[in-house]
Image: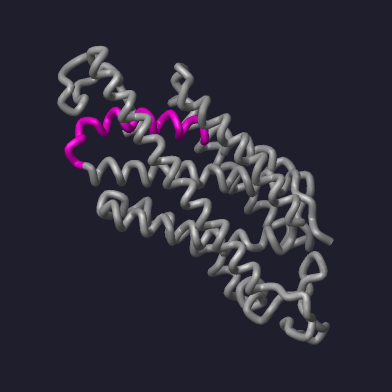
Amino acid sequence: MSHYDPNAQAYGGYGYGQPTAVQQAQIDQGLRSYMVGVYNYMMIGLAITGMAALGVYMLSVTGDASLAQQTARGAMRVSGGQFLTPFGAFLFASWFKFVVILAPLGVVMLLSFRADRLSAPAAQITFWIYAALVGVSLTTILLVYAHTSVARVFFITAAAFGALSLWGYTTKRDLSGMGTFLMMGLFGLIIAMLVNIGIAAFTGTPSTMLQWIISVVGVLIFAGLTAYDTQNIKNEYIYSLAYANDGSMVQKAAIFGALQLYINFVGMFQFLMALLGSRDE
């Protein structure tokens, strides 16, 4: 789907070659409606993530040390004078934290490997489940960072994402060449993160300089992916006109497009938090 030829056959019944002015107007109107649907799916996913993170946070912390998870050293304290409840300690201070971390990855892999077999309703439900699991894993941000800082970085991310996605949608420049470069950068970023985890395991603390580099590169990679994926989603809509009579396929394409943009938003937000976030001591 990523190789879009605007001169190719298959405008979903519009005929061969370039469409007429009337046909182009119909395509533009359909494209706007399609992109609104993509952004709506994405925003619903982000809302589910936010509600899941806030709900789990409220269940995971308490200001009363007597109600907190107790250890030999006393109540398990987190930032801001808060303490972990037994529920919070189970999620984030026991072996189950690895399930919290890896569960979203498992669901997104399911979406990726079974994309052709999933129906549109199944893909939508799986996306919502993935968004909720991401929210649970992002609760750690609320445990560590000042909430005013989280809100500030969220709005910075939203502004940057909106500008980049708008540019990807409106630019006449072909961004397809960025895809391979960005994916190589993403794999390199993952390797650097694993190296920093290894450094932390051997020395007790991760490399501050390497972490800063990872955060900067991470922001740049997800910024590029936001523009690239937006243009790609736009181009894929033209391809989907060949299947205009199959509303389920078009809906599923919109869901997967929303998933791509959602992942970019969350990735950019996490790396910006590492750069700009203020810890709640």
Which quadrant of the figure has residue 145? bottom right
Do we see residue 265 in this rendering?
A: yes
Q: Nearer the viewer, residue 204 or 224?
A: 224
214 relative position to 205: left or right: left
101 relative position to 93: left or right: left
Q: Quadrant of the N terminus?
A: top left
216 relative position to 257: left or right: right
Q: Quadrant of the C terminus?
A: bottom right
Q: Main secondary structure of the magenta part?
A: helix
Q: Nearer the viewer, residue 240 or 212?
A: 240
Magenta extent: 226-246
- Say which residue appears at 44% left-offset and 20% top-offset: 174
Within the magenta stretch, is there residue 241?
yes
- Say which residue appears at 51% left-offset and 47% top-offset: 263
Which quadrant of the figure has residue 217? top right
Does residue 32 lie above or below 37 as drawn? above
239 relative position to 177: left or right: left
Estimate the x, y position of residue 247 in percent, counting from the top left.
23, 42
- Say which residue appears at 27% left-offset and 23% top-offset: 26
